[in-house]
Image (spheres, rainbow, N blue to C red):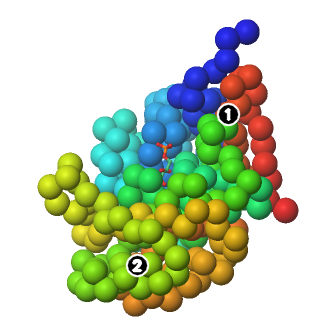
Amino acid sequence: MAKLSILEQKQIAAAAAAEFVENRMIVGLGSGSTSEFAVRLLAEKVKAGLKIVGVPSSITTEKLARRLKIPLVSDFGVITKIDLTIDGADEVDPQLNLIKGGGGALTREKIVTSRSERVIIIVDEKKLVKKLGKFAVPVEILPFGWRSTMELLRSFGARTKLREQAKTAPFRTDNGNYIVDCAFGKIKNPPLLAQQLKSIIGVVETGLFISRADLVLVGRNTGRVEEKWSA
Ligand code: 5RP
């Protein structure tokens, strides 16, 4: 049988996650191409009568969900708790720690996931790693004093690169900030590194998501979706 492509793996993981969404849930909507599959599937369910309210984790996701007519709150407003968030990731380790932020939405994603009762991460099998760190850790920083913030990131062993927008200007997040991609190589102690980076004044948030996933759904090239539950 033909093996599933990466896109198809993302699609089956998203479809499996959509099955966890129940009527009247407040649902955190992740960002990136895998999350987009999930948003599109949820929109179909809404069209068929499912009642949910979505909390988007980026402006791109918000625009997509609005276009697809998913009822939304764009800011938390009176909502303090999200029932379930479905989001993608750039890397997942065996403890279900994650690197996120390839699309630059890491801070809003972290706010949304941290307010969620349950977080389901959806990935293709290429995202599974033994140790985090092949993917450079995206770190959102304030533009003010960015060179010195970058210097401090380097002092923790990172090779740093300010993310650019079409090579002309720094990439700006939805919050108006910069992203520094920090290549550490294999990260020995992700929880410690997350704390260290977060302690730098000028760092808004890091793409290290520690103990945030309750369930990771991995689309395999065989067509199976593997469930990895947190311990
Ligand atoms: C965006 C993210 C994405 O979830 C992550 O980059 C995965 O993206 P994709 O699903 O396109 O592979 O964290 O900030």
- Looking at this view, name the residue that lies furthest to the top: 1
The quadrant in which residue 67 appears is: top left
* Helix, strand or loop under label 1: strand
Question: What's the distance in space between the residues labelled 2 and 1, CA to CA?
Answer: 32 Å
Q: Is 150 placed left or right of 147 in the picture?
A: right
Camera-side residue of 172 and 137 = 137
In the image, what residue type sits under mark 2? Val
**Label 2 or label 1, whichever comes before in sequence order:** 2
Quadrant assignment for the N terminus: top right
Question: Label 2 CB, ligand 1: below 8 Å?
Answer: no
Give whichever of 165, 214 is nearer the camera. Answer: 165
Mark 1 nearby-residue class (10 Å; few <14, some 14–19, many ≥20)? many
Say the numbered circle drawn on residue 204.
2
Residue at 60% over, 78% down: 193
Residue 17 appears in the rendering:
yes
Quickly name the residue at label 1: 219
Is residue 46 among the parts visible in the rendering? no
> Residue at image x 52%, y 76%?
157
Looking at this view, is 130 or 33 the one in front? 130
Q: Is residue 87 left or right of residue 192?
A: left
Q: Nearer the viewer, residue 12 or 177?
A: 177
**Amino acid found under the numbered disc labelled 1:** Gly
